[in-house]
Image (cartoon, rainbow, N blue to C red):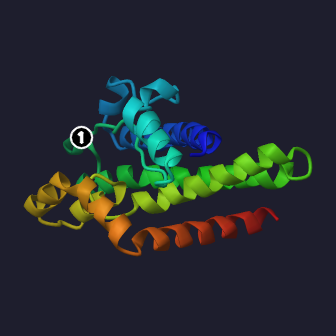
Amino acid sequence: MNIELAIINVCLLCILTVPHEFAHAWMASKLGDDTPEREGRLTLYPPAHIDPIGTVLLPAITSLFGGGLLGWGRPVNTTPSRLRYGLNGMALVAMAGPASNVIMTALFAAVSVFTASLFTPLSEVAERAASLSMYLAVFNMLPVPPLDGSKLLIAARFPLAIYEELGRFGFLLLMVLLTATPLGVWLYRLSIGSTDAIFRIFQ
C-alpha cells in the first residue's frame, strides 16, 4: 500500500475533475442550455463538481491497493431539447470534457518542463498530472455509458433502447473490459504516447 501515492492521485483527480465538469457546463451554456448554470455547475468552485465517493473515496481505495485509479466527478445535467444543433450539440457538450483534459495535459507538461531544473518535486508532480489528465481524456472517449464517448453513439442515432440497456450495465462492462482484455494496456500506451508528444512540444 502506497499511502503517499494514493493521496497524490486523489488530489490530482480532484484538480482535474473541476475543469472537466466545468467544460461540460460551459459548452452547454454556450449552446443555449441554462440547466448547468441554474444548478450551480457553471463555476470552477471545486465542491460543485467533486463527488465524495467517486472523486475521493473510490480513487483512494483503488489507488491504495494497486488497482489503478478509478473515479468520477458529479455529472453535469443538461436538457438536450434546449441545446442548439440537437443531438450533435449534446455530442459537443460531451466532448468538451475530454478536450479540457488535453488542455490541462499541455498546461501541466509546460509546468513540468519549465520547473525541471528549478524545483524537481513540483516538476515530477506536474508530470504525473499531465499523464493522468491525458489518460482521463482517452478513457472518457470509450463509447460505453456513462462515459463521454458514449454520447457520440446517440449523435450517430444509435438505437436508444440498446443504449439505455448498455447504460444499465456500463460500469460492470467497463470493469470486465479493463480486467479481462488488453484494453487497459492499450489505453495506457495511447495516453502515454500522446502525453510524450505534448512534452516534446515544450522540450
Specify whether 43 is left or right of 53: right
Q: Which x, y percent locates residue 123?
A: 79, 49
The quarter of the picture where the C terminus appears is bottom right
Residue 121 seen in the figure:
yes
Q: Is residue 196 left or right of residue 116?
A: left
Between residues 24 and 62, which one lies in front from this camera angle?
A: 62
Residue 82 to residue 157: above or below: above
Task: Using the rendered view, name the quadrant where residue 172 is placed.
Answer: bottom left
Residue at the (60%, 53%) spot, across then down: 103
In this rendering, the count of numbered labels is 1
Residue lying farthest to the right in this orientation: 117
In this view, the residue farthest toward the front is 1
Mark 1: amino acid: Arg
Q: Is residue 126 above or below residue 181?
A: above
Q: Residue at x 38, y 34 (%)?
A: 53
Disc 1 crowd, CA 10 A, few/some/many (<14, 14-19, 20+): some
Q: Position of residue 105 (x, y in %)?
A: 63, 54
Q: Position of residue 106 (x, y in %)?
A: 67, 55
Whether residue 34 is visible: no
* Closer to the camera in the image, 87 or 98: 98
Q: Give the quarter of the image for residue 163.
A: bottom left
Q: Is residue 193 above or below residue 32?
A: below
**In terms of secondary structure, where does tag 1 sit?**
helix
Residue at mark 1? 82
Going by the picture, which residue comes out furthest to the left? 161
Quarter of the image for residue 95 reads: bottom left
The residue at the point 86 percent across, 52 percent down is 116
Percent coordinates x, y for residue 170 in the rendering: 24, 56
